[in-house]
């Protein structure tokens, strides 16, 4: 199978280069159109914060990987990239890499199941652009099946592997129902934003953001449909929140033990959760000694993250087994698209239909006519299949490209339902 893939990712390139080569949806659509015109019969493009990849069946049988590298680099501002920043794959290795991406084991955060949605979105764009043909649709089905199996059959995506998510998961263990709770996130940087998004995803009743730069807090609040208040009013509002997550870059303690003691008193000693995920710490660690206050800092959360990461790593062999199974299944199907297996399957399919119908009606004929019935119906099937058989053999003999021939075989198999469960063919027996 002449499926090529080139990838620039977190294993091969620094973050600055990955950011420089990240493609927006509009850019992906523009590049797909050019790829269709210049390089590839069909394919798709994946671009996330950690990878930019092109998969496709080339128009030229021996398309150099360097042309795909240049193709990617040529559509962005000049960047300092080399051949060493790319990984190249062919045939089974291309699929294996894609399956690793879809399953999350190739992610920077092992088991990140967000990538499965990003893979789906990439295929949808390719399909809308007429870039995902018969073969790519089959590739898509296999990749999504791998991703779903990895999630449902292994624990590769279980447990928090970021400090922000670990904080929210720990909060869930303290407050089982966040839909009745209020939360404050201090800091509107990347860590604070991720924590705020996780709280929003957990249906927190009320979410508020504060940040030294008020415009940044207001922007994040608007993005998450949350509230905000000026940073210098922090201590005035502490008592209003059941949950406080702090993630600033401050050099000094922002919330003292006395601040929390005052807040918990105003709350009539209703429980309060403090999650300090800042380095250095924003909240005085002695607040952990206050009754009804649940305090955790980044060190305790990192222990949770490391434990979960170890558990996920232990699941990788299970996911790799799924990938190998699906690779074998895919290539068993692909190899069946050659002329000889397709001709045999087609004849078996029609013979099964013929035999079934004869069996149903055999008692309507006299004993001397039964043999004639067998002969006549077999002749009919042979005549029906004579021309298709000749044309199928020509597909291989006429120098037709392997992918084009496989596509034609696949269309025939789909047309007669040869590969569908319950079809009348040899696979059913």
Image (tube, rainbow, N blue to C red):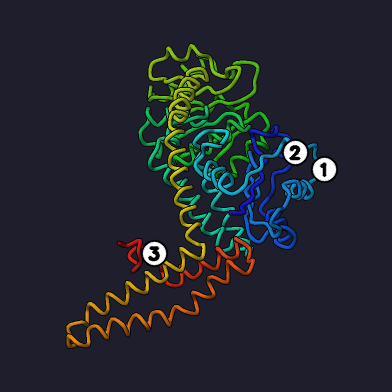
Locate the C terminus and report the quarter of the image it occupies: bottom left
Q: Which residue is mark 1?
A: 78
Residue at x 52% of width, y 54% of height: 140
Residue position marked by numbered label 2 in the rendering:
83
Q: Which mark is residue 420?
A: 3
Q: Hey, which quadrant is residue 153 in on the image?
A: top left
- Label 1 CA crowd tier, 10 Å (few <14, some 14–19, many 20+): few
Residue 86 in view in this figure: yes
Label 2 vs label 3: CA separation?
43 Å
Q: Quadrant of residue 205?
A: top left
Residue at the spot x=43%, y=82% of the render? 383
Quadrant into which the N terminus falls: bottom right
| Secondary element at image label 1 | loop
Q: Residues within 10 Å of mark 2 (few under 14, many from 20)?
A: few
Locate residue 307 relative to residue 14 in the image: left or right: left
Nearer the N terminus, badge 1 or badge 3? Answer: 1
Q: Position of residue 223 (x, y in %)?
A: 59, 44
> Residue 413 location, x and y as percent?
46, 68
Query: Residue 21, how many percent across, how many down?
Result: 72, 43
Point out which mark residue 98 bears: none
Residue 241 in view, yes or no: no
Q: Is residue 46 above or below residue 348?
A: above
Secondary structure, mark 3, is loop
């Amino acid at each position: 199978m002449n499926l090529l893939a080139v990838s620039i990712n977190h294993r091969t390139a620094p973050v600055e280069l990955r950011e420089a080569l990240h493609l927006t949806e509009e850019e992906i659509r523009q590049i797909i159109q050019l790829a269709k015109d210049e390089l590839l019969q069909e394919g798709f493009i994946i671009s996330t914060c950690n990878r930019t990849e092109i998969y496709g069946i080339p128009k030229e049988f021996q398309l150099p990987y360097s042309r795909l590298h240049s193709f990617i680099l040529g559509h962005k501002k000049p960047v300092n990239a080399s051949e060493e920043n790319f990984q190249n794959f062919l045939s089974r290795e291309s699929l294996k890499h894609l399956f690793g991406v879809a399953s999350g084991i190739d992610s920077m955060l092992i088991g990140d199941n967000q990538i499965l949605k990003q893979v789906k979105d990439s295929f949808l764009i390719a399909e809308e652009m007429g870039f995902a043909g018969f073969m790519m649709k089959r590739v898509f089905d296999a990749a999504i099946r791998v991703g779903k199996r990895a999630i449902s059959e292994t624990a590769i995506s279980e447990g928090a592997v970021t400090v922000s998510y670990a904080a929210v998961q720990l909060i869930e263990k303290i407050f089982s129902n966040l839909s009745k709770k209020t939360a404050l996130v201090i800091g509107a940087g990347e860590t604070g934003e991720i924590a705020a998004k996780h709280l929003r995803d957990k249906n927190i009743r009320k979410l508020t953001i504060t940040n030294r730069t008020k415009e940044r807090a207001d922007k994040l609040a608007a993005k998450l449909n949350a509230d905000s208040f000026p940073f210098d009013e922090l201590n005035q509002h502490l008592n209003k929140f059941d949950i406080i997550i702090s993630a600033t870059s401050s050099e000094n303690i922002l919330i003292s033990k006395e601040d929390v003691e005052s807040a918990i008193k105003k709350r009539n000693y209703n429980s309060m959760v403090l999650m300090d995920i800042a380095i250095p710490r924003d909240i005085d660690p002695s607040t952990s000694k206050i009754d009804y206050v649940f305090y955790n800092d980044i060190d305790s959360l990192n222990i949770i993250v490391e434990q979960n990461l170890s558990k996920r790593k232990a699941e990788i062999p299970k996911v790799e087994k799924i990938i190998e199974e699906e690779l074998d299944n895919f290539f068993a199907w692909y190899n069946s698209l050659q002329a000889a297996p397709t001709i045999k399957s087609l004849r078996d399919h029609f013979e099964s239909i013929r035999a079934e119908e004869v069996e149903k009606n055999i008692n309507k004929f006299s004993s001397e006519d039964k043999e004639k019935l067998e002969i006549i119906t077999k002749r009919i099937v042979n005549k029906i299949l004579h021309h298709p058989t000749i044309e199928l053999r020509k597909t291989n003999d006429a120098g037709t490209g392997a992918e084009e021939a496989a596509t034609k075989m696949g269309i025939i198999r789909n047309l007669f339902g040869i590969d569908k469960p319950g079809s009348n063919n040899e696979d059913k027996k």
